[in-house]
């Protein structure tokens, strides 16, 4: 792969955010909603991971079946000089327009590749949650990524909007409640099990929610996170240092609907954070990568 990073990124300030003074980090994570797979987007994300030394990168809304995920894994591995671990949560294609919405995958590079002990997903098979467990010298940590569906713009219950796909799946398995209740419940179940085992968790993804509860699809992200004993260290530091993180740049009013939360800030101390601001992401006019660096308590 030709290294086009110099072409795709601005030369100055291609990451908005901050690093804590004199802070060292053990792991750097990142997530990006790519709004449907294509090879060019995948190559840009891989270049971003390499040039920004990302250890663990999640791609949301890949819209790929199981067979397509296997092909994507082979392609992605060919884009890195070193070997890497790739796991995916695929979607079923009902054979209709927009049928493959959802799904996600994770790329784990360098020394962290050999630290992978297990991966798991939720049981809906729509890419709502993907968790990878990594073994460090002293403990196991969990890194999870989620994708919360927006509400469809029309009233067509037969459409393949992700929300409707969850509704149909829940009806099929005779589950009560709304899709967001199911997804949050699946996350809470993983968090509780991790807490019982002493496994700290990083949870990131496209939550389609603002921290202040205004606008976006879900108004109670902060309340829900608090109920789950999750901390949004990035939000706290952004406010304290007057930093504006804009991860969603579609339309006239950019905002942050992608977030990275942690279950235990003593065991996972934030060392830095930011989002991409290079020209390539504005070409896609949707989401931009959000990253964070953490020190892992020994």
Image (cartoon, rainbow, N blue to C red):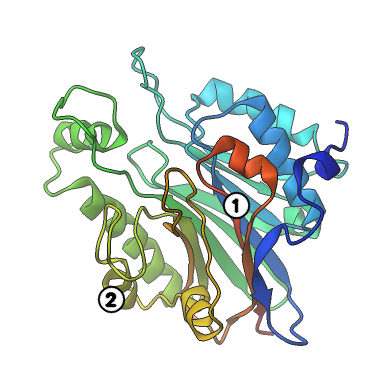
Label 2: few (<14), some (14–19) or many (≥20) C-alpha neighbours in 10 Å: few
Residue at image position (54%, 50%) is 119
Quarter of the image that includes the C terminus:
bottom right
Query: Between residues 141 and 291, which one lies in front from this camera angle?
Result: 291
Residue named by callout 2: 227
Label 1: few (<14), some (14–19) or many (≥20) C-alpha neighbours in 10 Å: many
**In the rendered image, the vertical position of residue 201 relative to residue 269, given as above or below:** above
- Residues at marks 1 and 2, CA–CA distance in whole angstroms: 27 Å
For label 2, the SS is helix
Residue 295 appears at what percent x and percent y?
68, 79
**In the rendered image, the vertical position of residue 48 relative to residue 4, given as above or below:** below
The quarter of the picture where residue 226 lies is bottom left
**In the rendered image, the vertical position of residue 149 relative to residue 94, given as above or below:** below
Residue 28 appears at what percent x and percent y?
69, 64
**In the rendered image, the vertical position of residue 84 relative to residue 212, given as above or below:** above
For label 1, the SS is loop
Quarter of the image that includes the N terminus:
top right
In the drawing, does residue 148 fall left or right of residue 290? left
Residue 38 appears at what percent x and percent y?
61, 26
Residue named by callout 1: 289
Please tell me which of labels 1 and 2 falls first in the chain. 2
In the drawing, does residue 136 fall left or right of residue 50? left
Residue at image position (76%, 50%) is 10
């Amino acid at each position: 792969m030709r290294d086009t990073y110099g072409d795709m990124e601005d030369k100055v300030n291609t990451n908005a955010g901050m690093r804590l003074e004199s802070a060292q980090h053990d792991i750097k994570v990142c997530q990006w909603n790519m709004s449907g797979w294509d090879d060019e987007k995948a190559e840009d994300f891989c270049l971003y991971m390499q040039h920004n030394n990302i250890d663990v990168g999640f791609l949301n809304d890949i819209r790929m079946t199981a067979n397509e995920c296997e092909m994507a894994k082979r392609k992605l591995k060919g884009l890195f000089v070193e070997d890497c671990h790739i796991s995916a949560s695929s979607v079923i294609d009902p054979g209709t327009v927009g049928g493959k919405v959802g799904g996600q995958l994770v790329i784990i590079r360098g020394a962290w590749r050999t630290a992978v002990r297990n991966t798991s997903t939720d049981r809906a098979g729509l890419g709502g949650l993907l968790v990878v467990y990594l073994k460090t010298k002293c403990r196991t940590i969990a890194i999870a990524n989620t994708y919360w569906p927006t509400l469809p713009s029309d009233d067509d219950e037969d459409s393949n909007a992700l929300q409707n796909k969850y509704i149909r799946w829940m009806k099929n398995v005779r589950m009560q409640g709304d899709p967001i209740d199911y997804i949050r419940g699946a996350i809470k179940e993983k968090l509780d099990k991790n807490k019982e085992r002493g496994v700290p968790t990083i949870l990131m993804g496209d939550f389609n929610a603002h921290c202040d509860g205004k606008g976006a699809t879900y108004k109670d992200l902060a309340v829900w996170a608090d109920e789950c004993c999750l901390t949004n260290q990035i939000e706290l530091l952004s406010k304290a240092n007057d930093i504006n993180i804009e991860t969603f740049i579609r339309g006239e009013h950019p905002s942050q609907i992608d977030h990275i939360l942690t279950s235990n800030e003593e065991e996972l101390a934030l060392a830095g954070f930011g989002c991409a601001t290079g020209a390539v992401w504005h070409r896609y006019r949707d989401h931009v990568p959000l990253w964070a660096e953490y020190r892992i308590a020994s």
